[in-house]
Amino acid sequence: MSDKMSARIHLTGHVQSPDFPDWISRHAHKLGLDHVTTEQVPSGLEVTAVGAEEMLQALALGVSLGPESVLIETMTITTTTCA
């Protein structure tokens, strides 16, 4: 059984597509992740989620491929153990 982790995924590139946040949310919930947020920041898009580490990694992989409306240039993922 995996401990819950929190992840922050920072994306740069063409990530301003209006359908991208909903796309991320749908995929995150399919993976059983909680507390999913997306926020446009000056350098790109920040995604946060909580869940099993392997599911967070799966989300990061899916997001890096994204829908056709986005083009990811860089992705950084930071995970921490939830208290």
Image: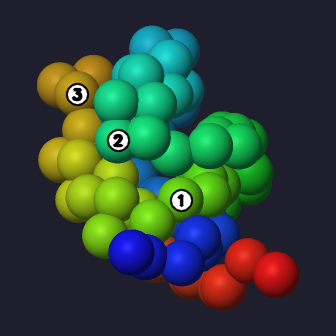
Q: In the image, which disc is placed on residue 67? A: 3
Q: Residue at x 39, y 75 (%)?
A: 1
Cα distance between the residues tagged 2 and 3: 17 Å
Q: Which mark is residue 37?
A: none
Which picture quadrant has residue 69? Answer: top left
Q: Is residue 29 left or right of residue 48?
A: left
Instruction: Report how many numbered discs are placed on residues in the image.
Output: 3
Q: Is residue 12 at least partly visible in the picture?
A: yes
Label 3: state its secondary structure: loop
Q: Mark 3 or mark 1, which has the lower sequence index?
A: 1
Side of 76 where 54 appears, left or right: left
Q: Amino acid at mark 3?
A: Pro
Question: Which quarter of the figure is the C terminus placed in?
Answer: bottom right
The residue depicted at 25 percent of the width and 38 percent of the height is 66
Q: Identify residue for label 1.
A: 51
Q: Residue at x 34, y 30 (%)?
A: 30
**Disc 2 and disc 3 in contact, CB within 8 angstroms:** no
Residue 77 coordinates in the image, percent (x, y): 48, 76
Inter-mark Cα distance, 3 to 1: 22 Å
Query: Which residue type does callout 2 highlight?
Result: Leu
Question: 10 Å neighbourhood of mark 2: few (<14), some, or many (≥20)?
Answer: some
- Colour convention: rainbow
Instruction: Name the residue tied to disc 2.
Output: 31
Name the residue rendered at 74%, 51% in the picture: 41
Q: From where the camera sits, is residue 60 visible?
A: no
In the rendered image, the vertical position of residue 26 relative to residue 27, given as above or below: above
Task: Tell me if mark 3 has few (under 14), some (14-19) or many (20+) residues whose alpha carbon lies within 10 angstroms of its own.
Answer: some
